[in-house]
Amino acid sequence: MDRTTFAPRYREIEQAIRERIADLRPGDRLPSDSDLCAEFGVSRMTARNAMARLAEEGLVVRDPGRGSFVAEPPSHRRADSLMSFSREMRRQGRVPASRMLACVVRDVTTREAVELRMPTGDSVVSIKRIRLADRQPIAIEHVVLHGRTAAVVLGADLTTGSLHQTLLEAGFIPTKGQATIWAEAASDEDAALLDVKPGDPLLVERRVILDQFGRPLERTESRYAADRYALDVGFSVEDRGARARTRGETT
């Protein structure tokens, strides 16, 4: 079997449901676990795992005894999950597009080689785009992809099309990753590209994403105009037991 095209079965189900959700409305019923078992020829555990992952991302609502339904689109993307920009904007009822600034094959830099676990001297695909929603600039996105994606990426329409979808269809499946988020003031170049003022606040997200085999696939830095983009964060409170004990001791 070709390792570059293999994907776990639950990932296949996830992707199929994602594509269906794009054409459905919030509240529409989705296939049951039994339906998915019959359609994809998988175990109930595999079907349940796929739907549970979609529920964790906020795409699906699971109602015990009733079934699975399309969730209301969130106002913002959750910080602990990654949805492609194109899909995220469509879920908000907006029209995504991109303005290409650069798309080249070049040698990997020292820092990129470390983060992508590549030998120095190897090649990467470097893509820089302005991401738009309803023709308004939302972010400057700089993506560095492992050189093994070059043939697929260089032949793709990355102006109106989705890079994420291009990778998926070619068998390069973004699976998990690590991101760092911080605030930064817009440089003169940022300001010109995003139509903001120099010094205006930006939300910057830098992430490294692994493929289905645990190999680094891409390194991306997105620089968002802070008044046009936000992230939702879920969290738990640390040291709840210690705080409860402290309150008991002081009352």
Image (tube, rainbow, N blue to C red):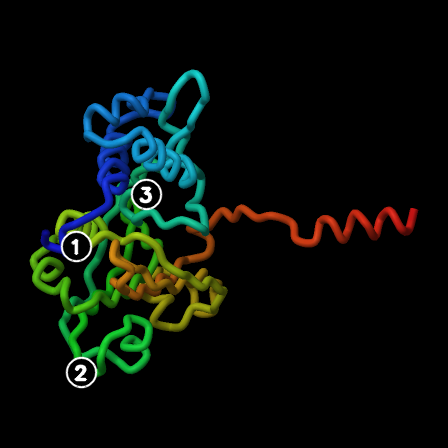
Q: Is residue 106 above or below residue 228?
A: below
Total number of numbered discs in the rendering: 3
Give percent across and percent down for residue 208.
Answer: 34, 64
Q: Earlier in the sequence, mark 2 or mark 3?
A: 3
Q: Amino acid at mark 1?
A: Leu
Q: Nearer the viewer, residue 159 or 59?
A: 59
Cα separation, mark 2 vs mark 3, equals 37 Å
User: Is 203 positioned to the left or the right of 92 in the image?
Assistant: right
Give the class, few, some or many, for how many residues have Cα within 10 Å of label 1's Cα (few <14, many ≥20). Answer: some
Q: Which of the labelled discs sits on residue 89, or is there none?
A: 3
Cα separation, mark 2 vs mark 1, equals 26 Å
Q: Amino acid at mark 3?
A: Met
Q: Which of the labelled discs sits on residue 32, or is there none?
A: none
User: Is 76 positioned to the left or the right of 243 in the image?
Assistant: left
Cα separation, mark 1 vs mark 3, equals 16 Å
The residue lying at 8 percent from left, 62 percent from top is 151
Q: Is residue 101 above or below residue 132?
A: below
Give percent across and percent down for residue 197.
Answer: 43, 65
Give percent across and percent down for residue 174.
Answer: 27, 53
The residue mark sitting in front, 2 or 3, is: 2
The residue lying at 22 percent from left, 65 percent from top is 145
The residue mark sitting in front, 2 or 1, is: 2
Quarter residue 57 falls in: top left
Quarter residue 88 falls in: top left
Write down the residue under mark 2. Answer: 121
Give the class, few, some or many, for how many residues have Cα within 10 Å of label 2's Cα (few <14, many ≥20). Answer: few
Write down the residue under mark 1. Answer: 158
Give the class, few, some or many, for how many residues have Cα within 10 Å of label 3's Cα (few <14, many ≥20). Answer: some
Quarter residue 221 falls in: bottom left
Q: Is residue 33 above or below residue 142?
A: above
